[in-house]
Image: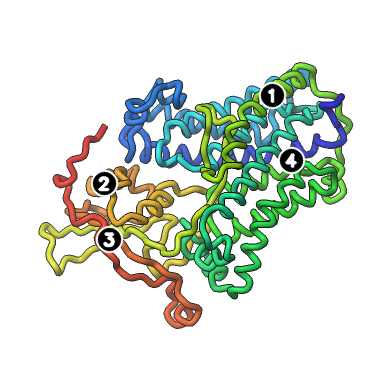
Amino acid sequence: MLLWEPETYWLVRVLFHRALAVIYLLAFIIAARQFRPLAGEDGLLSIQQYVDRHEFRERPSLFYLYPDDRVIGSTAWVGVGLSVLALVGFPSWLPRPYAVPVSMLLWLLLWALYLSFVNAGQTFYGYGWESMLLETGFLAAFLGAGPAGPPVAVVWLLKWVLFRNMFGAGLIKLRGDDCWRDLTALDYHYETQPIPNPVSWYAHHLPDRFHRIEVLGNHVIEVAVPFLYFAPQPWASVAGVATIGFQGWLMLTGNFSWLNALTIVQAIATFSDGVLTSILPVVAPNTSAPPLYLQALSMVLAVVVVWRSIDPVRNILSEQQVMNTAFDPLRLVNTYGAFGSITRTRYEIVVQGTTDEVVTADTEWRAYEFKGKPTDTAQRPRQVAPYHYRLDWQLWFAAMAPSPHRSPWFLALLDRLLAGDEATEDLLASVPFAETTPTHIRAVRYRYRFTTPKKRRQTGQWWERERVGTYVSPVSDGDLRLDRV
């Protein structure tokens, strides 16, 4: 009975499962559309590189055993189908004895399939929200289904994930960049974040005093509020509302894949059925205790999570705290944190091609447009969150250096564009060569800034830029000599 509060968490579980299924659905759609040109057989970082450089026990994945684009594509679409089943609550349609085991199987399959993408995706899947989705999704398998209430222990484990997510992010900011401590971080962040959206421009131009209040509020919500997740109601729900509001503002003003959306999903665990029925037009049904085997499994799970939490807790308490790190190949208990340092200057790589046989000072270069990152200064920033344009994010990181020596996949990108590879071109918003391929291609590095309100009114431009260097000098197909594995 200690593990079961039927009037408390049945609605919470339903809402949590449906919301998490949406995140999984999005993640698998992205994998179906982007994984193969990025990390498939002929990807910018080929799947064979993953197989050659890792042991299965280090980074287990179905694609280690079957490094094949057909298997990758089929797995992604199976994940889409399973996500739809989770979204519509399929396990609860089944007779009572089958609801819980089928639910567990469904969520464990989603976890295992997505683990295959994360562990094989190399640089393009090296983000903290990947591990966060896996950890959250694994716990979701033990919440049960049908008329039985969920084990309370698992709900508290979800709160523990949320706590590490938020508190880790708060501490790494306070320990990291000085601008978080002097409250000036948001003077830069909206302009220099990986992929700004239309609201980012307006947020950047808010008064400095408002930015100071924002940063102070950030510290309160990320460092102080998380302790209330474990408080009695209604304080836990108050903390959940504060967290959801904070994450909603981040979604409104930026694009961080599903990081903020997933944090909102985790925050559902801070509510209770009593709170939900008081604010929503829903009624919690009469529920029964979860099966004994599920209660026993939830206790075993709690012991495992406590044991695996030792390293993440040590990391959180360390002055040398690192962010977004998995401590086991299954990514069951991880450490999180974001934007411990703030970029002051925004650099962008502009990829350009030409059909001229010989490059001269008079050569006309035409730019490739990407789906998320800015290139055309007149292009309004795009709202994409929680969708994740993985190539665009990596281009943001690549632009921090004056050359691609830390981004070996970038030369492969140029190689594919020279060849007119359709799968690679599908990752872009537009290609300037409709019926031919470029003879030469180059990459130019620019500094980008948001325009002032006055200049945007006069010109309609969202950005202004200045060239700061050549990222890759003009090359043709023969110059690159890349191995296509």
Task: Say which amino acid is labelled 4.
Answer: Ala
Decide which of tag 4 and tag 2 comes sooner along the chain.
Answer: 4
The CA span between labels 3 and 1 is 53 Å
Decide which of tag 1 and tag 2 comes sooner along the chain.
Answer: 1
Left or right of residue 33, residue 254 in this image? right
The CA span between labels 4 and 1 is 19 Å
The CA span between labels 4 and 2 is 45 Å
x, y percent for residue 477: 17, 46
Q: Secondary structure at mark 4?
A: helix
x, y percent for residue 194: 46, 56
Left or right of residue 307, residue 126 in this image? left
Residue hosting label 2:
411
Left or right of residue 480, residue 374 in this image? right
x, y percent for residue 452: 47, 77
Q: Residue at x 73, y 30 (%)?
A: 154
Callouts 3 and 2 close, C-beta under 8 Å:
no
Q: Secondary structure at mark 1?
A: helix
Q: Residue at x 50, y 32 (%)?
A: 77
Residue hosting label 3:
444
Decide which of tag 4 and tag 3 comes sooner along the chain.
Answer: 4
Residue hosting label 1:
303
The CA span between labels 1 and 2 is 47 Å
Decide which of tag 3 and tag 1 comes sooner along the chain.
Answer: 1
Q: Quadrant of the C terminus?
A: top left
**Which of pointers 3 and 1 indicates the residue nearer the eye?**
1
Asked whether residue 153 appears in the rendered view, the answer is yes
Q: Residue at x 55, y 67 (%)?
A: 184
Q: Quadrant of the N terminus?
A: top right
Q: Residue at x 87, y 43 (%)?
A: 274
Residue hosting label 4:
269
Q: Secondary structure at mark 2?
A: helix
